[in-house]
Image: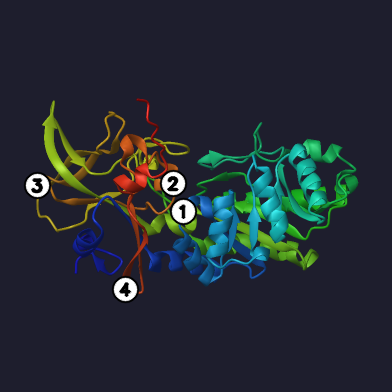
Amino acid sequence: MSESTSVGTVPVSELVERFGTPLYVYDGARITEQFRGLRDRLHPAVEMFYSLKANPNVSICALLHSLGARAEVSSLTELVTAQRAGVPAEQIMFLGPGKSHYEIAACLKEEITLICESFGELALIDELAEGLATTARVVLRVNPSFAVKGSGLTMGGKPRQFGIDEAALLAADDLATRHRHVRLVGFQAYMGTRFLDEDMIAANTERILELAERLGAHLGVPLEVVDVGGGLGVAYFPGERDLDVAALADRLNPIFTRFHDRYPATRLVMELGRYLVGHSGTYAVQVRYVKESMGERFAVADGGTNHHMAAVGIGSFVKRNFPMRLLNRDSAAEGVKWNVTGPLCTPNDTIGKAVELPADLAPGDVVGVERSGAYGPTASPVHFLSHGYPAEVLVHDGEARLIRTRDDVESMLAAQILHDFH
């Protein structure tokens, strides 16, 4: 079987026949390879947490947890997802700059560690913990005074809604004793995402560990947990390269070893989302029409930016194409430039601009947007024009398993309430 006609080990023709399109397909073997490739090389004291924001499907979370991943969550639904995937409370951490009363209380009831991002939030945690007659375990998220280069999306070192400024923490000498129902247990810093330079990641990690050590000594906070963030990237575009995991471990492990030798009881945490699942996903769309307009070829497909907004350059992405290919057949036709568009009534619904695909591309063909396992439908306007969610499938151990049903008309309308105005 040629590579162009399968995802994982299952033919695309079989997937399309069984599940239809648009369709997200995740390769479980690739997820396993990504996790184990880093886990087997990284210092054993480092705990690898899966960031559910990258792909919050419960089966994806369950697969990663079966491999040894913990869970980092940022909403009540993500928390319940991790729990249903079998992740125990001591292996879950909850972060986010705008936590609700309900989310904080849910964490307190389950004794889940909270990553706190402001003094106001810390006071609220204390108040809710008092009401529940418990003591909250809290890690402080720090917005360091230093910034880093090499990140596709910087998250620290500048004025941010994330974390507490380093200078503000240094000025809060009584913080460890200020709140009677809070136990501060460590620090977290997350400097950015889409890092593709091993030296930059190592330098960033070393500075975060030094920062945690300095703040812990100044504030009297025991270093039970130090979370160095993560942000390991995926190469999407020409000129980018994937991280060399062996080289990365070679740079990180001496840093972790030196810290672990000084603090052998400290839990070292690394958060990984995109890196674990990004490579595994293919967004498959079926071509409905082909046309030419003012000298350019268009392939109009049944799915577009409503399911894959990242493909058009939101957030950290510049407007370059994700890798794309014809999935359902081999073609000997020459490669020509196609604009691959979706069904939405907006000119922005273009998931591929001037993509090289076979000249004989035709209605019924299936085109795949690769490296689409992270920030897919949940980071997209799936309800625009009421097309709804696509189906999601996990190919694992040679079996294609439906892990999310496709929205239909009734499921889309079920939450709406019709009033009679006659």
Q: x, y (%) of residue 339?
A: 22, 37
Mark 1 or mark 3, earlier in chain:
1
Mark 4 or mark 3, earlier in chain:
3
* In this view, the mark in front (4 or 3): 4
Residue wearing tag 2: 378
Q: Residue 55 got which mark?
A: 1
Q: Residues within 10 Å of mark 4 (few under 14, many from 20)?
A: few
Q: Which is more toward the observer, 244 or 372?
A: 372
- On screen, residue 197 versus residue 253, left or right, reads left
Q: Quadrant of residue 169?
A: top right
- For the residues labelled 1 and 3, say whether their Cβ atoms are less than 8 Å apart: no
Mark 4 or mark 1, earlier in chain:
1
Image quarter (top left, top right, bottom left or bottom right) of the C terminus: top left
Residue wearing tag 4: 398
Rendered position, 64 above or below 243: below
How many callouts does the rendering have?
A: 4
Identify which residue is drawn at 55% across, 53% down. Answer: 78
Tell me which amino acid carries mark 1: Asn
* In this view, the mark in front (1 or 3): 1
Tell me which amino acid carries mark 3: Asp
Tell me which amino acid carries mark 4: Gly
Q: CA distance from mark 1 to mark 3?
A: 34 Å
Residue wearing tag 3: 360
Q: CA distance from mark 3 to mark 2?
A: 33 Å
Rendered position, 397 above or below 52: below
Identify which residue is drawn at 70% across, 50% down. Answer: 105
- For the residues labelled 1 and 2, say whether their Cβ atoms are less than 8 Å apart: yes
Q: Residue 25 got which mark?
A: none
* In this view, the mark in front (4 or 2): 2
Mark 3 or mark 2, earlier in chain:
3
Identify which residue is drawn at 15% across, 51% down. Answer: 365
